[in-house]
Amino acid sequence: MERTLLNIGFGNTVAANHVIAIVTPSSSPMKRLKEDAKEGHRLIDATQGRRTRSIVITDSNHVILSAIQAETISQRFVTGFEFKEEGKRAKGAK
């Protein structure tokens, strides 16, 4: 099983196939989500002490904080899967 890693900044990566959503942290629901994850010991802080600029939500219900803009991570996410699909086509895989 191949894994594609998603760079969320400062040397931190997440298994891209487990990402459900990449959101901005500014809304009240996202602030509540962050607090609920913290209380449930499901919060992972990957900001390296910097301001939180995006929240990555995984299929295991973990909430990951990143100091990289949500748009930047989303572009990396899409680019990573496009690159992987091109590689499969080049090898003749379906």
Image (cartoon, rainbow, N blue to C red):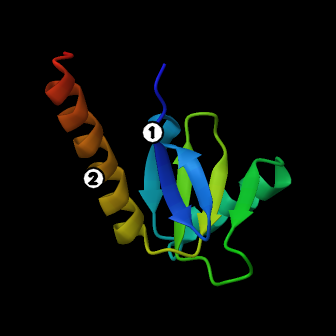
The local secondary structure at tag 2 comes to helix
Measuring from the top left, give residue 91's x and y in whole percent: 20, 23
8 or 65, which lies in front? 8
Q: Residue at 74%, 81% (x, y): give it.
A: 49
User: 15 left or right of 39?
Assistant: left
Nearer-N-terminus badge (1/2): 1
Please, is residue 9 above or below residue 26 in the view? Answer: above
Furthest toward the front, the residue is: 91
Q: Nearer the viewer, residue 67 or 91?
A: 91
Q: Residue at x 45, y 62 (%)?
A: 23
Residue marked by disc 1: 4
User: What amino acid type is highlighted by mark number 1?
Assistant: Thr
* Position of 38 relative to 69 (above/below): above
Label 1 CA crowd tier, 10 Å (few <14, some 14–19, many 20+)? some
Residue beneath disc 2: 79
Which quarter of the figure is the C terminus placed in? top left
Image spot of residue 73 (x, y percent): 41, 63
Compared with 45, 83 (above or below) is above
> Marks 1 and 2: CB-CB under 8 Å?
no
Q: Is residue 56 left or right of residue 32?
A: left
Q: Amino acid at mark 2?
A: Thr
Closer to the camera in the image, 68 or 53: 68
Give how far across and how far down residue 42 sits, in percent. Answer: 76, 47
In the visual, does 19 lie left or right of 31? left
Residue shown at the point (67%, 73%) measured from the top left: 47
Dot 1: element: loop
Residue placed most toward the observer, 20 or 1: 1
Q: Could you give the CA–CA distance between mark 1 and mark 2, rounded to whole angstroms?
A: 11 Å
Residue 4 image offset from top left, x and y in percent: 45, 39
